[in-house]
Image (cartoon, rainbow, N blue to C red):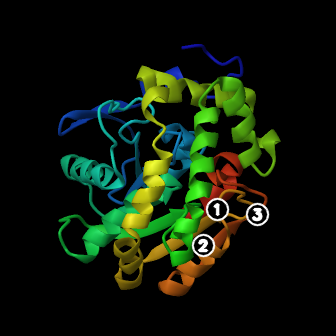
Amino acid sequence: MDLALDKNIRTAESWRNKGIFIPVFNKEIFTIDLGESEDCLVILHGYLTSSYDYNKVIDELSKKYRVIIPDLIGFGFSDKVFDYYFTSVDQADYILEFCKQLGLKNITFLGHDYGTAIVQEILARKNANVLGLQIKEFIYCNGNLPINHSNFLDTQDSLKSEVSKKIITMLASFGVYKKTMKEIFFDNANITDEELKQMWLQLEYNHGRKVINFIYNYLRERKIFWNRWSLAIKETTVPIRIIWGKKDLLVDEIIPLNLANKVQANNIHWINDAGHFPMLEKPKEFISAVLNG
């Protein structure tokens, strides 16, 4: 892997050296594990990215929590799946076994983007009392949550196809990836070409680009599980917090507002002048929101 020229930017190689591999069932999950607290913060990252999204915030977060950030199966340095679509339910199975193997207690789950779907499935199982884990709270961050039926109307199928095509195009080359990612940031000056290059290297790792384009299946999956996941939000007694980049162009801000109306959410912590990746674009504000919520 190429090293970045800016010494202040963590390279993909140095990030890999910072982590460990945890065997879960028949897969190896790359994991960043930092901090000594008995309170554990398990972070589930988004689509097309990895644990590296949190490289700017993990050091400060680990002063309060033991921070555990796995690369989800099919992403980053974790094992890839080449022969079938690995669903959010599958991901939840692995993450829960992963937590049990590490003996985690007092867990806060933080889900961003695709990670919120996995958190939803974990929440549904928590409500059914089938986990055997001590979960302290859930934190949602810029994810397209199943709040309204209108999110899943059949009339949106053409839009889903367009999203899928855009993702395929995005994976064509680093140049296209870089351009598209910068459009997601409120101020693209907050993400450098070097940082995006390190993210791209992790996306490419072990033929990652060949297996990662499952966005259309994922959108269908959200539709299938709408009832299960929306009821989980309504029925839970576990505290929920919301941290949201307010200038997100991918996810309508009505989603966190509706979520707050459906649960006893403490509040919505808006991170102003941040887009879909507040942990990368406004790391100080993101750290404050997590630690002081």
Task: Determine whether 237 is above or below 99 in the image.
Answer: below
| Residue 62 shows in this picture | no
Q: Disc 3 marks which residue?
A: 272
- Hey, which residue is sitting farthest top in the picture? 2
Measured in 3D between alpha carbons, the distance from the residue under mark 3 to the one under mark 1, in whole angstroms, is 15 Å
Residue 56, image x, y percentages: 61, 42
Asked whether, in this view, residue 224 is left or right of residue 255, the answer is left
Q: Position of residue 98 (x, y in %)?
A: 25, 47
Label 1 sits on a secondary structure element that is: loop
Residue at image location 69% in from the left, 40% down from the top: 181
Image coordinates of residue 25 in percent, x first then y, are 17, 39
User: What residue is shown with label 2?
Assistant: 255
Q: Quadrant of the N terminus?
A: top right
Viewer-proximal residue, 56 or 73? 73
**Whether residue 265 is visible:** yes
Q: Residues within 10 Å of mark 2 (few under 14, many from 20)?
A: some
Image position of 116 (left or right of 121):
right
Query: Disc 2 to disc 1, how far (Cα)?
Result: 7 Å
* Vertical arrangement, residue 280 with respect to residue 131, above or below: above
Q: Is the Cβ of the residue at disc 2 closer than 8 Å to that at disc 1?
A: yes
Q: Is residue 194 left or right of residue 120?
A: right
Q: Position of residue 221 (x, y in %)?
A: 40, 58
Q: Which residue is mark 1?
A: 251
Q: Residue at x 34, y 50 (%)?
A: 87
